[in-house]
């Protein structure tokens, strides 16, 4: 039995090591293999080692299951659930469930690594079953020992044992103490504090992350990630020694972490598509990004548009005047419409054009400005004539802040001779449809992360240069407003 128990505690130890490693995952980030592989890529391979935890529990459970069945057979009992007592039957079922859960957890880690949440749930479920088995096994062993001891005593001494004494005799002290220590460690590593922590992430080789069809290998261009998540007690401890950690109180009513996780994952997809279209337009392939009307994002309740227009409608005409973008809509309304006027709005709905009359009303902010009670956004057409293939990195969950450097990398691949001009480039910032580079969060931590690498220039949104320099005073930081600014700077400077 002790070997099986060792398997259980080995699994717990592996989990603790991985939890600690996840807290300090950014520390080895400057590590770069001779092949150009970044630390963020190596993490994907190291993740498979987590499968050793559920496999350890599965092996321990299988070993205990075999011993239990073998013991029942030797004692003359019929091997099988029907021939066993209630406690033994429950324990066998627990061990069988643990063995299956351990194998299932390892299967998810090995064959579905992109399902990170499912893998963590499977490992946590197997861990709970392992805890129950440790407690139940020691309880039964102590109970058996106590029963044998009672049989060897005189009846008079047997009757003197008090109820608390019987309870303590059966209580699984060793397993309980070990699991309490484990619970303490998990509290330090996982208990939410009500704060959000921002700390350095890792650099991401953009020409390794993305490859445009027909493109070259490209030069040294790094994006950079930052970690932002609910803080746990160990973060508070690390923050005492690492000034690069920033904390802020999580406001009430903020969406749960799982919802935020889904949002940032979607942002990554959107940023990739914008970067592809902008880059190919700059490289002379296709038309880049054009607008094809104004999409209605939301409708104000009880406004003139409520019940007549729908979220998702794309406005293409006002009174038969073409509308290609928000600027066209705003300009026509300012020049030709007054509050109280009825306007014929042509929208594209389910692939067909529909014309609807809607009365304009005065804006609450300006009684002379006509509105319909809608919020809008440009309907974009992204021309992407060449396919771009992406590598999936487990630590690159999402977000749009890699957009500018992804755009630069695709341009670099599609331009003969590249565009880096010998520079080892790093950068951050979103990419907008017109090529503008937008602000991002965690700029101080990102600058610090880049300063630990071989990059010799770091491009950031122009409005965030001063903040970036607080994280890396010695790093060459260049503020830019558009992707054209980046290209112009690289072409006009030599390292």
Image (cartoon, rainbow, N blue to C red):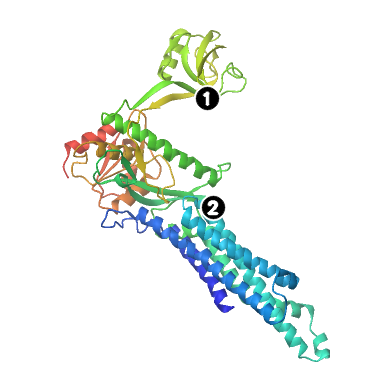
Query: Measured along the vertical axis of the image, is residue 409 above or below residue 127?
Result: above
At which x and y percent is residue 195? 51, 50
Q: Position of residue 402 (x, y in %)?
A: 36, 41
State the residue position of label 1: 312
**Mark 2 or 1, closer to the camera:** 2
Q: Quadrant of residue 212?
A: top left
Considering only vertical position in the picture, is 132 above or below 122?
A: below
Give the side of residue 241 with respect to residue 206, left or right: right
The residue indicated by pointer 2 is: 118
Q: Earlier in the sequence, mark 2 or mark 1?
A: 2
Q: Could one spot residue 242 in this view of the protein?
A: no
**SS assignment at label 1:** loop
**Dot 2 lies on which element?**
helix
In the rendered image, residue 462, in percent from the top left (x then y), is placed at 31, 36
Tell me whether circle 2 and circle 1 mark residues in contact (CB < 8 Å): no
Give 106 or 450, whichever is nearer the viewer. Answer: 106
How many numbered badges does the structure rendering display?
Answer: 2
Q: Residue at x 50, y 12 (%)?
A: 368
Lateral position of residue 148 relative to residue 380, left or right: right
Across and down, in percent, residue 177 comes to 60, 73
Q: Quadrant of the C terminus?
A: top left
The residue shown at (31%, 56%) is: 30
Residue at coordinates 44% horizontally, 47% vertically from top-left? 397
Q: Residue 479's quadrant in the figure?
A: top left
Specify the quadrant that holds the N terminus.
Answer: bottom right
Q: Which mark is residue 390?
A: none
Residue appearing at x 54%, y 70% in the figure: 59
Residue 441 lies, with reference to residue 132, above or below; the image says above
Mark 2, other Cα within 10 Å: few <14 / some 14–19 / many ≥20: some
């Amino acid at each position: 039995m002790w070997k099986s128990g060792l398997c259980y505690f080995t699994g717990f130890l592996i989990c603790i090591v991985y939890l600690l490693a996840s807290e300090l995952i950014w520390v080895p980030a400057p590590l770069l293999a001779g092949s150009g592989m970044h630390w963020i890529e190596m993490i994907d391979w190291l993740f498979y080692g987590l499968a050793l935890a559920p496999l350890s529990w599965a092996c321990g459970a299988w070993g205990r299951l075999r011993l239990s069945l073998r013991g029942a057979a030797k004692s003359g009992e019929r091997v099988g659930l029907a021939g066993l007592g209630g406690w033994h039957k429950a324990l066998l079922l627990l061990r069988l469930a643990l063995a299956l859960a351990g194998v299932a957890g390892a299967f998810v880690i090995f064959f579905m690594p992109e399902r990170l949440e499912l893998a963590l749930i499977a490992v946590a479920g197997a861990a709970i079953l392992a805890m129950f088995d440790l407690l139940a096994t020691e309880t039964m062993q102590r109970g058996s020992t106590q029963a044998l001891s009672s049989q060897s005593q005189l009846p008079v001494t047997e009757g003197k044992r008090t109820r608390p004494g019987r309870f303590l005799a059966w209580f699984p002290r060793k397993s309980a103490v070990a699991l309490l220590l484990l619970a303490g460690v998990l509290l330090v590593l996982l208990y939410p504090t009500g704060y959000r922590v921002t700390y350095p992430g890792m650099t991401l080789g953009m020409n390794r992350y993305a490859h445009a069809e027909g493109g070259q290998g490209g030069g040294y261009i790094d994006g950079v990630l930052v970690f932002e998540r609910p803080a746990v007690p160990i973060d508070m401890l690390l923050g005492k020694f690492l000034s690069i950690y920033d904390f802020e109180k999580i406001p009430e009513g903020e969406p749960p972490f799982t919802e935020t996780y889904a949002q940032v994952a979607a942002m990554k997809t959107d940023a990739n598509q914008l970067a592809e279209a902008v880059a190919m337009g700059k490289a002379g392939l296709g038309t880049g990004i054009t607008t094809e009307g104004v999409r209605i994002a939301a409708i104000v309740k009880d406004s003139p548009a409520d019940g007549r227009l729908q979220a998702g409608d794309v406005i293409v005409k006002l009174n038969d005047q073409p509308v290609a973008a928000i600027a066209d809509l705003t300009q026509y309304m300012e020049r030709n419409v007054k509050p109280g006027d009825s306007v014929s709005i042509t929208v594209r709905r389910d692939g067909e054009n529909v014309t609807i009359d809607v009365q304009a009303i005065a804006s609450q902010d300006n009684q002379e400005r006509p509105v319909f009670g809608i919020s809008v956004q440009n309907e974009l057409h992204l021309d992407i004539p060449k396919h771009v293939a992406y590598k999936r990195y487990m630590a690159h969950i999402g977000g749009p802040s890699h957009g500018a450097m992804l755009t630069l990398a695709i341009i670099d691949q599609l331009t003969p001779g590249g565009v880096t001009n010998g520079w080892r480039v790093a950068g951050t910032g979103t990419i907008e449809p017109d090529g503008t580079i937008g602000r991002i969060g965690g700029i101080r931590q990102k600058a610090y992360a880049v300063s630990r690498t071989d990059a010799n220039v770091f491009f950031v949104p122009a409005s965030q240069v001063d903040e970036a320099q607080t994280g890396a005073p010695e790093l060459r930081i260049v503020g830019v407003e558009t992707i054209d600014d980046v290209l112009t700077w690289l072409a006009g400077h030599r390292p």
